[in-house]
Amino acid sequence: DAGVIQSPRHEVTEMGQEVTLRCKPISGHDYLFWYRQTMMRGLELLIYFNNNVPIDDSGMPEDRFSAKMPNASFSTLKIQPSEPRDSAVYFCASSPGTVNTEAFFGQGTRLTVV
Amino acid sequence: RKEVEQDPGPFNVPEGATVAFNCTYSNSASQSFFWYRQDCRKEPKLLMSVYSSGNEDGRFTAQLNRASQYISLLIRDSKLSDSATYLCVAIRDDKIIFGKGTRLHILP
């Protein structure tokens, strides 16, 4: 298995534009997590899914952020409209049957909003 | 106050030395604990789980103290390749909560 695949690896966009980040989890993993990492705040859990269903989105900063998981092999995190303070590295991670096991991270998307 | 807290460091340690750092968690309902390692501009990767009885993996030893609500990581005979950020993780109610990490620099 190729591991968790995220795209794009880097994204530079102008303030106000829509940004869509994509994630393909490891096949067979039931949990999918979206994290945001900044120097100031560290690694923050934004939302996670279990069997494609959003379980906890309390970490989503505001209504500009939305996440979907239409099937077991694909998830998106969308920011609309984007703002400079959204600049961060966004990681997707997946985990097998129970969350009390190892989470495997993708390489991340480095987002810069100018 | 963040739910999982770590000393950000950096810890600058000579090669071959032993280094230890702690992580505290505020929610007593936390069920499972892990240490992850993150290299510069890379993704976090699991280093080891932390068991109540303590556990060892080669040069690495992890301990859990539920009474005082902290976990620790000890690295013996440190190598240059141990330079990284070490992230403490607590799991509560199926949520994986990361600390901000402790930066470790091993000096030649």
Image (cartoon, rainbow, N blue to C red):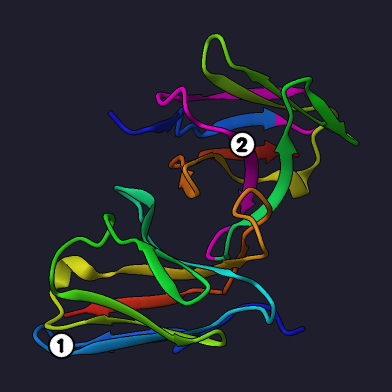
Q: Which residue is mark 2?
A: B32
Query: Viewed as shown, does residue B57 lie left or right of A37?
Result: right
Residue at left offset 45%, top offset 34%? B8
Residue at left offset 43%, top offset 42%? B100
Q: Depth-wise, is mark 1 or mark 2 nearer the camera?
A: 2
Residue at left offset 47%, top offset 43%? B93
Query: Viewed as shown, does residue B78 lie left or right of B19?
Result: right
Residue at left offset 55%, top offset 20%? B70
Residue B26 percent across, percent down from the top left:
40, 24
Rounded to the nearest angstrom, the CA distance separating label 1 from label 2 is: 41 Å
Q: Nearer the viewer, residue B26 or B93?
A: B93
Where are the magenta residues, as a range? B14-41
Which quarter of the rendered picture does the N terminus of chain B lie within?
top left
Of the residues shown, which amino acid type is indicated by label 2? Ser
Residue B67 percent across, percent down from the top left:
56, 9
Q: Which mark is residue A14?
A: 1
- Let me know if residue A94 is in the magenta part: no
Which quarter of the rendered picture does the C terminus of chain B lie within?
top right
